[in-house]
Image: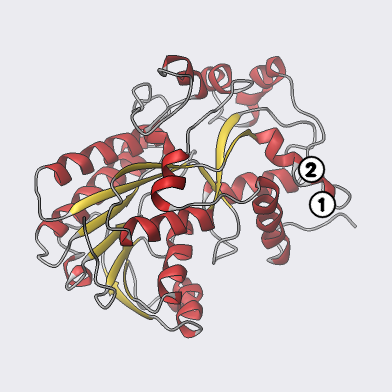
Amino acid sequence: MTHIDRNAPVMVSGATGYVAGVLVKRLLEEGLTVHAPVRDPDNLKKLKYLNAIADSTTGTLRFFKADLLEAGSYSEAMQGCELVYHTASPFFTKVRDPQKELVTPALEGTRNVLETANQTPSVKRLVLTSSCAAIYGECADLANTPNGVFTEDIWNTTSTLDHNPYAYSKTVAERAAWEIANAQSRWDMVVINPSLVIGPGINPNATSESYNILRRFGDGTMKAGCPRYGIGAVDVREVAEAHFQAGFRPEANGRHILSGHNTNLFEMAQTLQPRFGDSFPLPHRSMPKWLVWLVGPLVDKALTRSSIARNVGVPWIADNTKSQQSLGIEYRPLADSMNEFFQQLVDSGQLKPRA
């Protein structure tokens, strides 16, 4: 049982990120002091969304200069913290050099933060943002699970540097984290494994892949049809709440699948039809698998024929029981998350209705 003093500061790596931004908001609303290590504390433009939240809440936000790949650069930000959140990790599907752009930042960044925790006597608990990608590589992996469902006991064994490198990066980073955590006994680690994160973030212009998917739904890219690409989805506010609870619930332990819905891309797009269907070129029909297989790689190089075969028309099923029972998470309807997320892109001018 780990008890965290709420008067002590809390560190959040990657504070300008999609999930981290909503988490920082939650922490500041509780009146906590948040230490936010960022690459450039003087970049007021990039930090304006966090500063706006700090100005309107009772908590205190302090920025520190740090670099994910620079050993020891988190030391100052971590001083005095009993609770550390490590959320920083890249999420891109289009990369030229997977090792350099995905694996090295995820793996070395994780080692950097956790080794600093080892050297910081005040740290009692570290909450790591991993991913369901560390549990599975593709929907077809479901066939090899004990009960036809993804659980916290399962690890991704099918992704490699050349095949699905993003999932591979999340897997090796989480495995490395457990090695470091299990090699010591002063602090404990709790892991959050979200599926595809959706819903409005604090920065409407975020670069997360989640925003790119919503833009493609609304800008006409998929008006000819959308694949039934199996996926899990979860609202960013539930992911932030899970992080909060994982930090402050003394009994929290191990991995937690954070996924509100077993769904697919077409089903997600359909939730937008009642509210936005008349104004935006949303996909009206699902694209047959044979057609996705034929044209998918021509439209998007990241969509390989192998990934189409193993994910399109294949269900994604995960058990989220532990997150509900251990962290008290209640999942909101998929349509609510999708419509609020889409509305944020409309309000920020990134998606414009038809004239």
Could you say which disc has been placed on residue 234 in the image? none
Could you say which disc has been placed on residue 282 in the image? 2
Could you say which disc has been placed on residue 276 in the image? 1
Please give left or right for residue 17 compared with residue 73 in the image.
right
Look at the numbered disc 2 and give the secondary structure of its residue: loop
Q: Residue sitting at 45 percent across and 58 percent down? A: 240
- Report the amino acid beneath label 2: Leu
297 to 320, vertically: above or below: above
Image marks 2 and 1: residues in contact by CB distance under 8 Å: yes
11 to 225, vertically: above or below: below
Please give left or right for residue 205 compared with residue 187 in the image.
right
Quadrant of the frame with the N terminus: bottom left
The x, y position of residue 200, in whole percent, is 60, 60
Q: Residue sitting at 74 percent across and 48 percent down? A: 218
Rounded to the nearest whole Å, what is the CA distance between mark 2 and mark 1? 8 Å
Q: Residue sitting at 15 percent across and 61 percent down? A: 72
Q: Nearer the viewer, mark 2 or mark 1?
A: 1
- Report the amino acid beneath label 1: Phe
Colour mapping: secondary structure
The x, y position of residue 316, in whole percent, is 55, 27
Mark 1 nearby-residue class (10 Å; few <14, some 14–19, many ≥20): some
92 to 65, vertically: above or below: above
Please give left or right for residue 265 compared with residue 42 in the image.
right
Asked whether the viewer can see residue 207, the reply is no
Q: Nearer the viewer, residue 106 or 246?
A: 246
Mark 2 nearby-residue class (10 Å; few <14, some 14–19, many ≥20): many
Quadrant of the frame with the C terminus: bottom right
Q: Residue sitting at 44 percent across and 78 percent down? A: 44
Q: Nearer the viewer, residue 325 or 319?
A: 325
